[in-house]
Amino acid sequence: MNKFAKITAATAFAVLSAGPALAVDEHYIAGDAVVGGYDVVAYHTAGAPTMGSADYSATYQGATWYFSSAENLEMFNADPAKFAPAYGGWCSAGASKGKKVPTQPDLFAIVDGQLYLNSSPGAHNNLFLADTENVIRKGEGNWKQIFATPTGDL
């Protein structure tokens, strides 16, 4: 068996034996909810991070999401994929480098209707905003490999 075949077989075994991915693996959860309980719809409607409330919550992809109003909850429930942030709410610049890095709610951008969050002013300004297209392209490629990998294993 050549080296590539061994790596591929080992990778396939690891993926199949790991079982189903947990929401905690796929989404950045801080406290009780995805993205620390911030309302992901409000980024689109208010253009700013807005804290959500457990009074307006939904479950999507096995994770809890908070919203600041019944209207935002309703919008999310109607089309959760439209409002869920890229890379499960993990840092976009981090995803472009194959890492899951916790995000800060005020470091965000909406590109082509998709919410992207980042972890630090440097990641946001010097990586994501400076080379948005490339960061997204790399992040999309890496996310297919890292989405269900626990952060400690990256």
Image (spheres, helix red, strand yellow):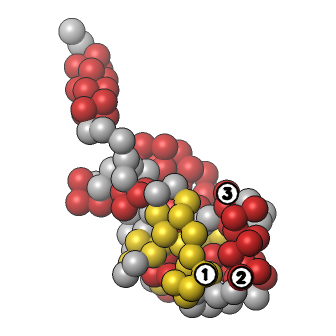
What residue does disc 2 label? 70
Q: Are marks 1 and 3 in contact (CB under 8 Å)?
A: no
Q: Quadrant of residue 102?
A: bottom left
Confirm whether residue 126 shows in the render. no
Confirm whether residue 16 shows in the render. yes
Q: Amino acid at mark 1?
A: Tyr
In the image, 20 versus 86, the foreground residue is 20
Mark 2–mark 1 distance (CA, rounded to whole Å): 6 Å
Q: Amino acid at mark 2?
A: Ala
Q: Is residue 107 left or right of residue 77?
A: left
Tell me which numbered mark, 3 or 2, is placed earlier along the sequence: 2
As drawn, 104 above or below 22: below
Residue 134: x and y in percent read: 61, 57
Mark 3–mark 2 distance (CA, rounded to whole Å): 18 Å
Q: Is residue 54 left or right of residue 45?
A: left
In the image, 112 versus 28, the foreground residue is 28
What residue does disc 3 label? 81
- Which one is closest to the eye, mark 1 or mark 3? 1
Mark 1–mark 3 distance (CA, rounded to whole Å): 18 Å
Secondary element type, mark 2: helix
Q: Are marks 3 and 2 in contact (CB under 8 Å)?
A: no
The numbered disc on residue 123 is none
Q: Amino acid at mark 3?
A: Ala
Crowd around label 3: few <14 · some 14–19 · many ≥20 (10 Å): few
The numbered disc on residue 56 is 1
Residue 118: x and y in percent read: 51, 75
Q: Is residue 83 left or right of residue 52?
A: right
